[in-house]
Amino acid sequence: MLARPTLFRVLLEERRWDNWVVFCEHFERAAREVALKSNSPRITGVTVGRRTFDRWFAGDLYSGPQHDAARVLEHLFEFSCTELFGPPDVSAAAGSAPSTGNFRSWPTCGAAPTEQPSSTPSPRTADYASGGFFMRSTKITRGREFVLAIDHGEDFFDALKKFCTENEVRSGYIPTFIGGFRHARLVGMCGAMDNPEAPLWDAVEVQTLEALGGGTLAWDTERDRLAPHIHVSAGLKESSADGRTSHLLAAEVQFIAELLVVEIAAPTLTRPRLASLYDVPLLTFDQQD
């Protein structure tokens, strides 16, 4: 069958999920939701291989997705598989919204996708726009302190956000954590950056690694959700512990991840995006005496 445009492809391009790694993040999260709703644990193991994704994306299908994969796709996109792999209905695609997650598409290598500027500049935007970068600091009042264990097979960020929601932690920091990851997505690329002064939105996928990391927990007021900022230094076990250090975007825990979490009772930490600084989210807080 000749490749043809499909609604599936239109939706992926519209949402910037047209990278296999990024698509799998959404698909696997949707699979867990379907498994929970249908009380069918086996569905959590449904995955999409690279070749399968490429065929779906190209519209080169002899038959559509079958059984559990079809159920997950229909849950994820809220269209039937017949509609997804049929001719695109642009009006329907434009009216649909992602059902899970808010990931951007970071290709493994290549040009970074264009980021949309924030419509609500930070109060400090004028300082950054004029080149007046300032060091900022404040005293903090520490709240509760926790030990958190994220277990084998869990999504690192899903588990961290669930913990913070259950314990009503909206501001805090992770002084250190150690653990293993089956796979992780880190900010990085395979070639020279077009503009080293601009942020990099690309990502690389790494497998079977041991990690040491830390970060801050702030509140995203625009999306009304937790916005963790985590960096790691990690050794790749299959490459003589060859090292990687970068911003952690996603990870699945292998064996265990052990975290110390310290709540900041005051001030509240927020992470607004600065339109004048490439739309980068920056840590913001009120001054305390």
Image (cartoon, rainbow, N blue to C red):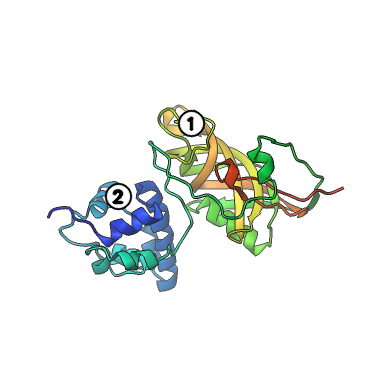
In terms of depth relative to the viewer, which is nearer, 138 or 195?
Answer: 195
Instruction: Determine if residue 151 is in view.
Output: no
Residue pointed to by mark 2: 49
Real-space CA distance between mark 2 and mark 1, rounded to the nearest whole angstrom: 33 Å
Which x, y percent locates residue 266? Answer: 79, 54
Q: Which tag, 2 or 1, sits closer to the chain's start? A: 2
Question: What residue appears at the point 46 percent right and 43 percent down from the top-left corner?
Answer: 185
| Residue under pointer 1 | 195
Q: Residue furthest left?
A: 1
Up-down relation of residue 230 to residue 189 (above or below): below
The location of residue 89, given as percent across then percent down, is 28, 66
User: What amino acid type is highlighted by mark number 1?
Assistant: Asn
Instruction: Report which quarter residue 203 is drawn in.
Output: top left
Closest to the camera, between mark 2 and mark 1, is 1
Give the residue at the far right of this rendering: 289
Mark 1 element type: loop
Q: Residue at x 39, y 62 (%)?
A: 31
77 left or right of 268? left
Looking at the picture, which amino acid does disc 2 mark? Gly
CB under 8 Å between discs 2 and 1: no
120 or 29: nearer the eye? Answer: 120
Give the class, few, some or many, for how many residues have Cα within 10 Å of label 1's Cα (few <14, many ≥20).
Answer: few
Q: Position of residue 242 (x, y in %)?
A: 48, 27
Q: Residue at x 33, y 67 (%)?
A: 91
Tag on residue 55?
Answer: none
Q: How many other residues sit within 10 Å of disc 2, few (<14), some (14-19) or many (≥20)? A: few
Determine the residue located farthest toward the bottom in the rendered image: 38
Tell me the SS state at disc 2. Answer: loop
Residue 6 percent across, percent down from the top left: 24, 59
| Left or right: 58 in relation to 244 | left
